[in-house]
Image (cartoon, rainbow, N blue to C red):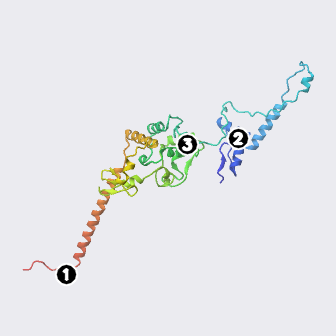
Amino acid sequence: MSSFTCISCRVQFPSGDAQRSHYKTDWHRYNLKRKVAGLAPVTAENFDERVLAQKAQQSNVPAKRADHIKQTKKTRARAPQPEVPPKIETTDEATAEDTDSEPEPLDLTECLFCPRDSVDLDAKLRHMAKSHGFFIPDVEYVSNLKGLVEHLDWKVGVANACLYCVHGGGDAAGAPRQFTCVEAAQNHMRDKAHCRMRYDETCAEEYADYYDFSAYRDGVVDGGEMSVSESTGELVLPSGSRAGHRSLQRYFKQSIPPDRCRQLKHRVITHYRALGWRGDEEAIVRKEFRMGQFAKQRRDLAGRVALGVKANKLQHHFRCQIMF
């Protein structure tokens, strides 16, 4: 199946050059105006017939009488005017401008789920969290927040895809579900309550470039004990605090200007917490610690039971322990 298509004219092309050439034809412009007016597209043969009929109709119209105009040498020698191309009849509603250019991703300040345009990226994320309930999962581990939002803008603006559902439904792996235009994709996400990112094993590779979980892996402690980070050599205390090595003292004394992306991520996390969101890192550590303790207790109990059964098998015959 060819990947170069025209939705307005419902045709396919073997290459991108043929698709771009088609966008410049009168047939494509005519179908665009019919699409805006809510009419079905016409085929190339039907379009040619309408053009010929329009030319024939214009040629049958009698010209205005101009006998009263005195012909002079200048009027007789005047060169004939070039032929005006026939005007295609359209409805009154077809007043939209030509939009045959290639689709572009949404603007960085434009909402993913509605046509609202915010002041900046921070205001955009606040609007989507408050109006549409959109939260970025594991936002504390996002390493490139702007790049992640730009990827979502491309996915909605260019691919016209839903951020959550995929072909096959449920949790089945597959390609994202696509729609005919941006408005259709936004209406679908609002109506189906899909104003969220699919964040599971099916899309781990898609968002892997925008997350960094090294801080979480280095900060997890086992049983409340201290550990040493393999990447930075820092001492991680049970409370989560970090103590740097004295060999890196000169780097700790440096006054480096804060990263703007990190400041934006901090504001987003603060806004999420104000709306009721809580991080789950501590809960995961506590749960893993409890599960480890339960597994150890089960192993100890199974060992004691096995030892008791083995000890009972050593006595082949019953003998009363009380001798009278």
* Element under disc 3: helix
In the orientation shown, which residue stands out farthest toward the right? 73
Disc 3 from disc 1: Cα separation: 80 Å
Residue 108: in sight, yes or no?
yes
Which residue does the numbered mark 2 point to in the structure image?
28
Depth check, mark 1 against mark 2: the one in front is 2
Query: Which residue occupies 29% across, 60% down?
Result: 294
Where is the C terminus found, in terms of image quarters? bottom left
Q: Is residue 69 above or below residue 266?
A: above
Is the Cβ of the residue at disc 3 closer than 8 Å to that at disc 2?
no
Which residue does the numbered mark 3 point to in the structure image?
185
Neighbourhood count class around disc 1 (C-alpha, 10 Å): few under 14, some 14–19, many 20 upward = few
In the orientation shown, which residue stands out farthest toward the left? 324
Residue 303 on image: x %, y % = 27, 69
Which residue does the numbered mark 1 point to in the structure image?
317
Residue 112 on image: x %, y % = 52, 40
